[in-house]
Image (tube, helix red, strand yellow):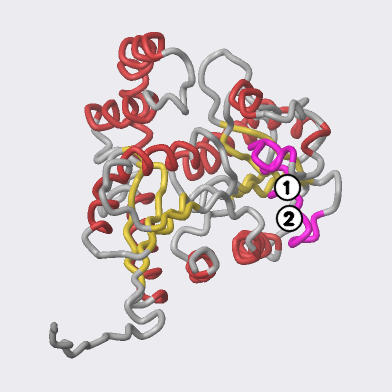
Amino acid sequence: MIPELPTQTTKLPTGMNKKIGVLIVNLGTPDSPSVPDVRKYLREFLMDERVIDIPFINRWFLINFIIAPFRAPKSAKVYQQLWTPAGSPLKIYGHSVEEKLQKVLGDQYVVKLAMRYQSPSIEDGLNALQKECLSEIIVVPFFPQYASASTGSVYKKVMEVVKDWLVLPEIRFVNRFLDHPKFVEGFANLGKKYMAQREYDHFVFSYHGIPERQITKGDVANHCSFGSCCDTLTHQNQHCYRAQCYETTRLFVKAMNIPEGKYTVCFQSRLGKTPWIKPYTDEVIPELVKKGVKSVLAFSPAFVADCLETTIEVGEEYKEAFEELGGQHWQLVESLNDSDIWIEALEDIVKSNHH
């Protein structure tokens, strides 16, 4: 007869030992504004098959022999304008958000910042989280609207990194947050701050553009006509980037009580000669001046942290173009950066996305 051994059971306190990883991911930035570092960044960014979605050989030649060699010196000069003594604003705000979000979420969570391109890399962030014995990981791409080239690319990279892990915790992805009340309120409050200082003739909502073909490829419902189909966000077009941008604008306009006819949605940063989603911001500006618009309050709501596309492109280049054509006042509304309301939004997004 085998003697009965004493048994000891350890009851884990509910929720106490559950640790959750949070990977916050922004687009990326060169390591420095030098031409070699900018070239390295452009190569990694533009070689992503979700960013320039053409066959590999064509993409390789286009990036390595045309875009990177000629664009890097020009882009480096622009990055030098943007750079601060502490480095890239995108990375500075990223680390600040990482620290603040960790503080408000507490010890049950482990927050890591990653960039889709360059450093800190998604691979380094996930490898650090892997060592924490996590029950789940929540991936929060810092893109309010879903696009294959941004959020979709983050998903793909994360899955490439974790596919060989022997132990896979539950992994959740945040798809978009354009309608999160704190995100809308944050931008609306910033807009109202400028609206209280003076009257504006017109409001411009300039989003980062993407090629039309990327939307057409993802349109499994054959719903898209690049027109009135974006007037409402439905289950058929919920992942259409253009439709999401128009929905974001409707939410902002409502929050700031901007009258119909006083605002324009447009798209910036196009590259190459293929059609990108319209209207183009640089073509909207002359039209506004022709209509007699003298003052513009400009938003760039595809970005949650100020970067080259907001500070330089919208804040300086479009301002210069507007004023050269006869406009009198162009004001960029800064992004959410590391503001308290953005941290509150992220805290809620994280907590509502785990068990």
Callout 1: SS: helix
Q: Residue at x 63, y 33 (%)?
A: 267
Q: Residue at x 35, y 81 (%)?
A: 16
Residue 185, percent from left and from top = 65, 65
Task: Please give left or right for residue 164 compared with residue 303 in the image.
Answer: left
Residue 287, percent from left and from top = 76, 29
Q: Nearer the viewer, residue 29 or 145?
A: 145
Q: What's the magenta region? A: 236-258
Which residue sits furthest front?
A: 1
Q: Residue at x 34, y 14 (%)?
A: 60
Q: Nearer the viewer, residue 92 or 174?
A: 174
Amino acid, disc 1: Glu
Q: Residue 164 appears in which quarter of the rendering?
A: top left
170 in relation to 61, above or below: below
Which residue sits furthest right?
A: 260
Q: Is residue 243 magenta?
A: yes
CA distance for labels 2 and 1? 6 Å
Q: Read off the residue under disc 2.
A: 251
Task: Please give left or right for residue 96 compared with residue 308 in the image.
Answer: left
Amino acid, disc 2: Leu
Task: Please give left or right for residue 279 compared with residue 87 in the image.
Answer: right
136 in relation to 232, above or below: below
Q: Indicate which disc residue 247 carries.
A: 1
Q: Nearer the viewer, residue 134 or 233?
A: 134
Residue 61, percent from left and from top = 35, 9
Q: Indicate which disc residue 173 carries.
A: none
Quadrant for the N terminus, please: bottom left
Q: Residue at x 49, y 38 (%)?
A: 152
Which residue sits furthest bottom?
A: 6
Look at the numbered discs 2 and 1 and tell me whether their residues touch, using CB distance below 8 Å: yes
Q: Is residue 133 magenta?
A: no
Residue 239, percent from left and from top = 64, 40
